[in-house]
Amino acid sequence: MAVRFGVNISYQQVYRGLHKGLEMLRGSPFESFEKLPYYYHNLKKKNPRTVTNIKVDKEGRFEMLFISIGVVIRTFRNDLRPMIIIDGAHLKSDFYNGVNLLAVGMDGNNQTLPIAYGICQGEDGPGWTWFLEQLKVCIGEEPNLTIISDRHPGIIHAVKKVYPKAFHGYCCRHLMMNAGIKVERFKTIFWKMCKAYTIPEFDTRKLPVTMLMEFFRDLLQRWYYERRDAGDAYVDAGENDLTPWAEAKVAFRIKKSYSLNVFGINAHRYQVDDKFASHVVDLNNRICSCRKWQLSGLPCNHVIAVSRFINKTDLGIFVEKWFKKSTYRATYEESINPVGDIEAWETPAYVAPVLPPVLGKRSAGRPKNKDRIPSKGEIRREPYCTRCTKIGHSKDRCKKPTSSQRSAYGWG
């Protein structure tokens, strides 16, 4: 500041000025909680059938929130496979350290799509139970629903309580890390045994609550626009044409199918043998004894071998609708509308503001950036020594003598 602008100010003044500027851009964290009900009102006005909820305590202070935009609800129920991935990320605000909860679906091109998002005070059983109860209001009791998560006790309890009929699977990355698999050869074998989906982390966890919710809405708006634009290329696609991701998966399975031997059982059932096992394919009931066809929605190599055996070249008839280009276009045919500038928001008298949660007293001085404890297997940044230029220690612990020490002892 002194060199560039000719102004002499202390470090503390710079720090306070930085936070004051961020508050001017983002708004006060306390005001952000008060604006939540008005944001909800305007969000639902611009995006019909959106489901929102705010849970408060007896004093009217914020406890939890939930949002699921109407367009995304319809998208999931009509065009996405019945699978939801749920996870939580700890917020990093200086004033509120809650948890951002997220429920994500997968479209026909295997791209993630947030179905619902919310905030609670802690990643525990009551928080996840309330979040899933709100989600159930949106999507109902979806038949054949699969929920994927890590093995957090709060999630396990909540899924059993809210979705007792759903299949609850665990993200295989967490299972592998907890199993302590370190040898690369065994990791390769492990990943061949399973398929894991992870939720991308967004670097917005320091935003005030209302701005964080607007970030997700804006993200969905952009994704719907970009993917609808990509889907326009499929306007002339045939009824059974597959999305690029599904087409690549099927192409890989086609290569694996050439070494299989097929034997007929009756008009719709076939035996398929490989070097290690024998499987039965039932075309009428769309079942293969390996279960990949039923679980993935894409024909396994056994089904592909049977289709070649009976001279059916159009594999699209064996693919579920979620992976077809026509469904992909339908997935993003609607739009998500912006809420508008805050100055133009409607603020009806019947909408009451929400009080901020009870916040801990801020300590003196600059707060330490105490991030969450990293998951097992996460790569930490290695210390770097500026003296010997080696990784693994800092210059304070370096055993290499400094230039002054070498001169003092005559080491040259």
Image (cartoon, rainbow, N blue to C red):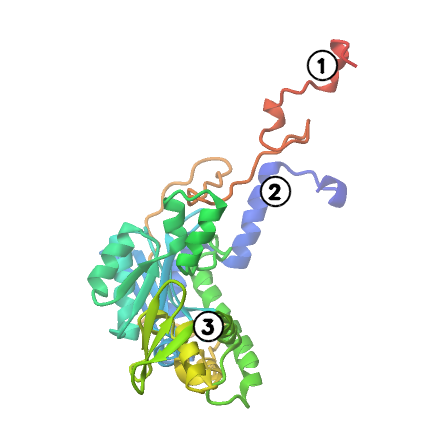
Q: Choose between 81 and 117: the one closer to the eye.
A: 81
Q: Nearer the viewer, mark 3 or mark 2?
A: 3
Separation of residues labelled 3 and 2 (CA atoms):
66 Å
Dot 1 or dot 2: first in sequence order is 2
Q: Which residue is mark 3?
A: 257
User: Can residue 47 be seen from the camera position used here?
Assistant: no
Q: Using the image as rendered, state which of residue 107 and residue 282 is in the foreground.
A: 282
Q: Residues within 10 Å of mark 2 (few under 14, many from 20)?
A: few
Report whether residue 210 is seen: yes
Residue found at x 27% / y 70%: 136
User: Height in image: 123 above or below 287?
Assistant: above
Rendered location of residue 163, percent (x, y): 23, 65
Left or right? Give the position of 295 relative to 227. left
Residue 157 locus on image (x, y percent)? 23, 55
Residue position for label 2: 14
Q: Is residue 399 above or below residue 341?
A: above
Q: Quadrant of the C terminus?
A: top right
Residue that mark 1 sits on:
405
- Quadrant where the N terminus lies? top right
Question: Rounded to the nearest whole Å, what is the CA distance between mark 1 and mark 2?
Answer: 38 Å
Q: Estimate the x, y position of residue 124 in percent, counting from the top left.
A: 28, 51
SS at mark 2 in the image: helix
Query: Looking at the rendered structure, which numbered label has been put on residue 199?
Result: none
Towards the viewer: 117 or 27: 117
Q: Along the polypeptide, which appears first: circle 1 or circle 3?
A: 3
- Left/right placement of residue 129 relative to residue 28 reads left
Q: Position of residue 251 (x, y in %)?
A: 51, 74
Q: Amino acid at mark 2?
A: Val
Determine the secondary structure under disc 3. helix
Residue kind at label 1, given as amino acid type: Gln
Q: How many C-alpha atoms fall within 10 Å of the one at disc 3: few (<14), some, or many (≥20)? A: many
Q: Quadrant of residue 279?
A: bottom left
